Image: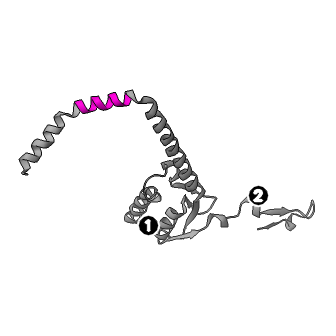
Amino acid sequence: MTVIGMIDSVLGAASHAPQLAQSAGAAVAANLPGVILVAAPLLLLLAAGQMLLARRALADRAGAEFLPRPGFDPGEEDILRFVHQLARAQASASRWHLTPRRATAVRIRLTSSGGPPSYRVEARSRTLALISRHAYVGCELRDPGQELTAAAGVTVTFEGPAELESTRVAA
């Protein structure tokens, strides 16, 4: 068979496409209850699978905190590389892209409590491992669970009304 013969056969089949579409539509209309009985459970199964994947992904989230060391001054190339890595992190979270986007999102929080700013990155643990492995050279990486909160780690004790020197803060 030559190339011209192949092109002619494709064009001949394409000329029958409207008739095939019309007959397929008529077949679906004639069997509509059966199509609904087959399609509805498949759609429900797909929705349940997406919910399960989303729950797994949300349960697998972790966080890391990047603290810049004194004198930290990244170059423009380092910043662009890190931003590009964060932008691609969501796509790498799901191998087959079946997990919903809301469950694979990367959250970045910039906080400062009177000291140097800290960057907290929250993502799936697999994604966070990739981000942490290629972090900035001048940043210290720490687990956010190490931070002390005012409610959990600080106690203030007053020894008496006039003794302000005995006020102590224990961490």
Q: Do tag 2 and tag 1 residues touch (Cβ < 8 Å)?
A: no
Number of callouts in the render? 2
**Mark 2 neighbour class, 10 Å CA radius: few under 14, some 14 to 19, many 20 or more:** few
Q: Nearer the viewer, residue 53 or 105?
A: 53
Colouring style: one colour
Residue where numbered disc 1 is placed: 74
**Mark 1 neighbour class, 10 Å CA radius: few under 14, some 14 to 19, many 20 or more:** few
| 21 is within the stretch colored magenta | yes
Q: Quadrant of the C terminus?
A: bottom right
| 27 is within the stretch colored magenta | yes
Q: Nearer the viewer, residue 41 or 117?
A: 41
Mark 2 vs mark 1, CA separation in Å = 35 Å
Element at badge 1?
loop
Residue 11: % across, % down: 13, 39
Residue 51: % across, % down: 55, 47
Element at badge 2?
helix
| Residue drawn at (49%, 62%) of the image | 127
Which span is picked out in magenta? 19-29
Residue type highlighted by circle 2: Ala
Main SS, magenta region, reads helix
Residue 52: % across, % down: 56, 51
Residue where numbered disc 2 is placed: 151
Q: Is residue 112 above or below residue 71?
A: above
| Residue drawn at (37%, 31%) of the image | 28
Residue type highlighted by circle 1: Pro
Give the label on residue 57, or none. none
